[in-house]
Image: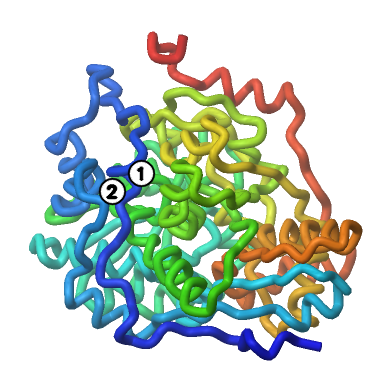
Amino acid sequence: MADKRIPTKMYLEESELPRYWYNLNAVLKHDPALNPKTLKPVTAEDLSEVFCEELVKQELNDKDEYIPIPEEIQEFYRMIRPSPLTRAYCLEKVLDTPAEIYYKFEGNNTSGSHKLNSAVAQAYYAKQQGLTSLTTETGAGQWGTALSMACAYYGLDLTVFMVKCSAEQKPFRRAVIETYGGKVIPSPSETTKVGREILKAFPNTGGSLGCAVSEATEKALETPNCKYVLGSVLDHVILHQTIIGLELKAVLEKYNIEPDMLISCIGGGSNFGGFVAPFIKDKISGTKNYRIIGVEPASCPSLTRGKYAYDFGDTGKMTPLLKMYTLGNGFMPTANHSGGLRYHGMNPFVSKLYHDGIIEATSVEQTKVFEAAVTFAKSEGILPAPESSHSIRVAIDEALKCKETGEKKKIVFCLTGTGYFDLKAYTAYNNKTMTDYIPTDEELQKGFDSLPNIEHNK
């Protein structure tokens, strides 16, 4: 019987919503990004060539643990937040596990994911700066959708370079982006110099986030009154996403729930970083002993099989050098169904947390991911995004371990979004035409060979 002391859905009141973002940069230092020309730490002037001024300040802020959320952004958040923390009683019953399973659901908005948390902040700062247009990349399309909504809200033009295989798999994502006024270009494309170079080197490629980042950056540099924004990898994006973790921590305390493990999918690191950041200080200090697990696809295993080194954040080698776990900027992932988890590298914070043993990481094959997704959909009534289903897979696996041991652990994961634009993937799984791909060591080595040959990597 369900524990009546814990409701199925738990919310914060509007008055309890966080009014600050949590800046992990003030608690945990990672190696600085480097200017690839000088190999010295990037400056605000370097970053301001591409990014909005206020976002650059946030990226480099290592002093303020809490950064105020502007009132106008708080007002926008109130339309979509708080997101619920749900006790997965039905899933627990199906699994016949003594474990308690909870998920923080970020898909209750038109974009269908957590991405809107940062999109509205970045569009707000662009508008405040007086910009008239933005460029970006998107993988599975959640970020492009969220940013198109935010740009429409603030009256900004938007060009979205969408990973080509995702644009082909998810035409309705493109339709939503265009409905909100965004222009979608499948990447790599013939519209940019770097896109043409990539197509020459990889004529049949389905693209990657690294390719799309290069094209969006080039477009921003060549367009008047325009800047580039991105939905993952950099620290200011994680900063905005800490609204998830701050809400989660508050609601767990409100209902007296002490988690044993926190689980989230991991591609570039935005949702994972935002989900766990407010818990990291307690973990580092030893006051709490959560297991914190990032889950990535076996086809693009940057943490579990990557190298910890300085690398470019894009395929065209236009970005600063980031110290991160990476498969190499030249790694071209296979066209799997988790377009949002197809990035060659990992956020520097998340990389350091993994390198220092503060968090764990694991990788899973996509057929096992979709098996978990279907189990979740049948029991909890939500069709999860493929990316989110990586978290579900590991949450189920941990709950089944509890079934074997009899332990009543509390498992909390982030359900980052819905999968209603991923029906081609679900069709492939249901028709048993979905296959798994795990890169060989030789294939990974080709990516590692693209790592910059600099003293910092020796």
Query: In the displayed structure, would residue 3 be above or below residue 34?
Result: below
Specify the label residue 53 is tagged with: none
Query: In the displayed structure, would residue 326 be above or below residue 2?
Result: above
Question: Is label 1 in a helix, a strand or a loop?
Answer: loop
Which residue is nearer to you in this view: 358 or 52?
A: 358
Foreground tag (2 vs 1): 2
Q: Residue at x 87, y 62 (%)?
A: 406
Please tell me how crowded label 1 is: few (under 14), some (14-19), or many (20+) other residues with Cα within 10 Å: some
> As drawn, is 121 to the left or to the right of 273?
left
Q: Which residue is at the far front?
A: 287
Q: Residue at x 77, y 39 (%)?
A: 438
| Badge 1 amino acid | Thr
* Residue 8 at least partly seen: no
Which residue is nearer to you in this view: 70 or 5?
A: 5
Q: Which residue is mark 1?
A: 192
Q: Which residue is mark 2?
A: 219
Q: How is the image coloured?
A: rainbow
Residue 47: image location, x then y, percent: 20, 39
Q: Are marks 2 and 1 in contact (CB under 8 Å)?
A: yes
| Badge 2 amino acid | Lys
Which residue is nearer to you in this view: 288 or 229?
A: 288
- Mark 2 and mark 1 lie on one chain; the one further toward the N terminus is 1
Label 2 and label 1: CA atoms lie apart by 7 Å
Q: Residue at x 26, y 62 (%)?
A: 122
Please tell me how crowded label 2 is: few (under 14), some (14-19), or many (20+) other residues with Cα within 10 Å: many
